[in-house]
Image (tube, rainbow, N blue to C red):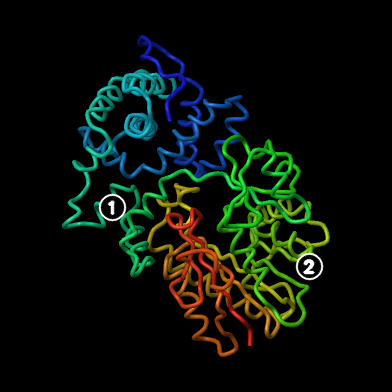
Amino acid sequence: MSDPRARPSRRAGRTPADPPREAAYDVLAAIREKDSYANLVLPPLLRSRGITGRDAAFATELASGTVRRLGSYDAVIAACVDRPLAEVDAPVLDALRLGTHQLLAMRVPSHAAVGTTVDLVRSKVGHGPAGFVNAVLRKVAAHDLAGWIRRVAPDPGTDPVGFSSVAYSHPRWVVSAFTAALGDDAGQLDSLLAADNVAPKVTLAARPGLSTVEELVVAGGTASSLSPYAVQLSSGDPGEVAAVREGRAGVQDEGSQLVAAAFAGAPLAGRDTRWLDLCAGPGGKSALLAALAGQRGARLLASERLEHRAALVAGATSRSGAGLLGVLSADGTRPAWRAGSFDRVLVDAPCTGLGALRRRPEARWRGTPGDIGQLVGLQRALLGSALDSVRPAGLVAYVTCSPVLAETSGVVSAVLAERDDVRLDDASPLFASLPQCEGPMPGTVQLWPHRHGTDAMFLALLRRG
């Protein structure tokens, strides 16, 4: 987007940074220093500083866009400095990344992108690095992004993974994992990686019995054709929508809504009054499920191991009424309830989060391949616990916000191989109107950003024998 404050650099001196760029810089510092997430840090920061309208949109694109394209930008910056990036002071490198994003991906004039970044460094770091930042960004400005990718990325003919890693700003191991997850559709890899770098629209979920799609549309949204509860906001702070502010609706990705609705809508014989959300934090699915349960005479217990996340669940479900049995802080691998006491159990398992890189781009830079082994052990334990918690003929939904095979079909296959009292149900009829959502195992479902415009949610339905 263009910069509403674009102007030539002011004269040298202790020049204050403009508020939107300073906000974006502070977000990058929080990500680096505190492992924060841009989508959680930025909104309250903008509100506290009174940054609104076009300035807020500019700051959001600058911060989030820079994090998404960090891998590409670091390769470009590395080609423009005379030292390893590890030897560039971290605060200065943050400023260089912000300046590079303005030069290569935003409609900011080159002189304004360079000048305002120099002003930012003077304000936030000091006068010393200003000349260095000016010189580096002038080199960056010599080519557009496509031109730089041709210069700094590996040859796609000899190193296609390396090329995609730099060109689309994903770690090599993530590119390889996505290639495997796409399987026969690996030719769609570039489309998937590109989709991860597009900022998603804010999607709201109207919680049945508490709010309606029509109410959210009147508040400034557009109804979606995928989820019957989804409304996409074209602009603005979702916290300003009355239904969201009052807890009658919430911000929830459409893929998350779809798998929750499938879990609630799957056919079930016999009693259907006790539901369990085994890994409930931060509470979006629990809030939607409790609303659905309340309309059907059922009640949902939301369980979350971490107390601070359980508090988020309690906040998200505070308006759920009769559909909520309660919120419990408990370890899902050590159930605090009697075996076989639930009719439906949802396991939205902790995972790498690689299916939500549009929304949380920082996740791509924080994980390692080694994390998957630890997560898989936990995922298998949670799925086993869920199956023990459901009654005979009851239903378990295993969900991850990741397409990585080890976390999806690998976990389901391993648990099925260990138990003779469980079978895999066919979830595809619940997504009959959605094209190309077949999962890696027959009967499972895999959503994709590049195909469906959702996070890459995986769903398997298992029936207790």
Q: Mark 2 is on which residue type?
A: Arg
Residue at the top extreme, as displayed: 11
The mark nearer the N terminus, 1 or 2, is 1
At label 1, which amino acid type do we have?
Answer: Ser
Asked if residue 149 lies left or right of residue 67, the reply is left
Could you say whether the residue bearing mark 1 is in a helix, strand or loop?
A: helix
Question: Which residue occupies 43% across, 73% down?
Answer: 440
Q: How far across and how far down the image is residue 235, in percent?
A: 57, 36
Q: Give the image location of residue 125, x and y in percent.
A: 40, 24
**Which quadrant does the C terminus fall into?**
bottom right
Q: Which residue matches tag 1?
A: 164
Q: Quadrant of the N terminus?
A: top left
| Real-space CA distance between mark 1 and mark 2, rounded to the nearest whole angstrom | 48 Å
User: Does residue 73 appear left or right of residue 46 in this picture?
Assistant: left
Q: Is residue 134 above or below residue 445?
A: above
Element assignment for label 2 = loop
User: Residue 25: x percent and y percent?
Assistant: 45, 31
Task: Find disc 2 in the rendering and name its residue.
Answer: 296
